[in-house]
Amino acid sequence: MRLTSKDIGSWGIFAIEGTVDSVQTKVFTDALSDYISKGHSNIIMDLSKAPFLSIGAIRYLNQLCQIIEAKSGRLVLLGANERIRRHIDIFVSWSKLKEINSLWEVIPLQMAGKLLETSTQILTEPTSSAE
């Protein structure tokens, strides 16, 4: 699992590459908690390169969504595959979590150039060669 972040305007893009299984859930939740603690209240969770999220990770996203909304922020999911969507539906429902199809649904198109200029921060690197 590799976690990266990128900031653009008032949004933070938190990207997951690889599987977040039950062993890696704590690393995932700690990295995201740290990211949130730095003042990010609008987050795009990019799941386009995540084949699987553990139940714990999904439940954490649901809790985090409620915390962020209480602070007038938003957490949206981008690129979730069918398996992740189904698990969200089963384990937490879509009552709080929202999905977008494109960054441009929340980030103004005028900021496209800024996205290319913004550097990506690596939060965690893969821990094994199996990913």
Image (cartoon, grey):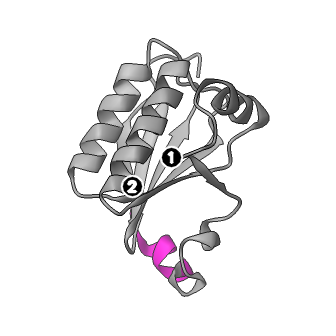
Residue 118 position in % (x across, y down): 41, 69
Three-letter amino acid code of the residue under disc 1: Ala
Packing grade of label 2 (10 A; few <14, some 14-19, many >=20) is: some
**Residue 120 visible in the shown view:** no
Q: Nearer the viewer, residue 130 or 77?
A: 77
Mark 1 against mark 2, which lies toward the viewer?
2
Identify the main secondary structure in magenta.
helix
Q: Indicate left or right for 18 with 68 as reference.
A: right
Q: Is 83 inside the magenta-drawn segment?
A: no
Residue at left offset 68%, top offset 42%: 80
Q: Earlier in the sequence, mark 1 or mark 2?
A: 1
Q: Secondary structure at mark 2?
A: helix
Q: Is residue 77 above or below residue 92?
A: below
Three-letter amino acid code of the residue under disc 2: Glu
Quadrant in the picture for the C terminus = top right
**Residue 108 visible in the shown view:** yes
User: Which residue does the numbered mark 1 point to in the structure image?
Assistant: 15
Considering every residue shown, the one lying at the far top of the view is: 23
Residue at left offset 67%, top offset 26%: 87
Residue 124 position in % (x across, y down): 37, 34
Q: Is residue 29 above or below residue 110?
A: above
Residue at left offset 64%, top offset 32%: 88
Residue extent of the magenta highlight: 112-119
Residue at left offset 49%, top offset 13%: 22
User: Which residue does the numbered mark 2 point to in the structure image?
Assistant: 69
Q: Using the rendered view, name the quadrant where residue 29 is placed.
A: top left
Residue 36 position in % (x across, y down): 29, 48
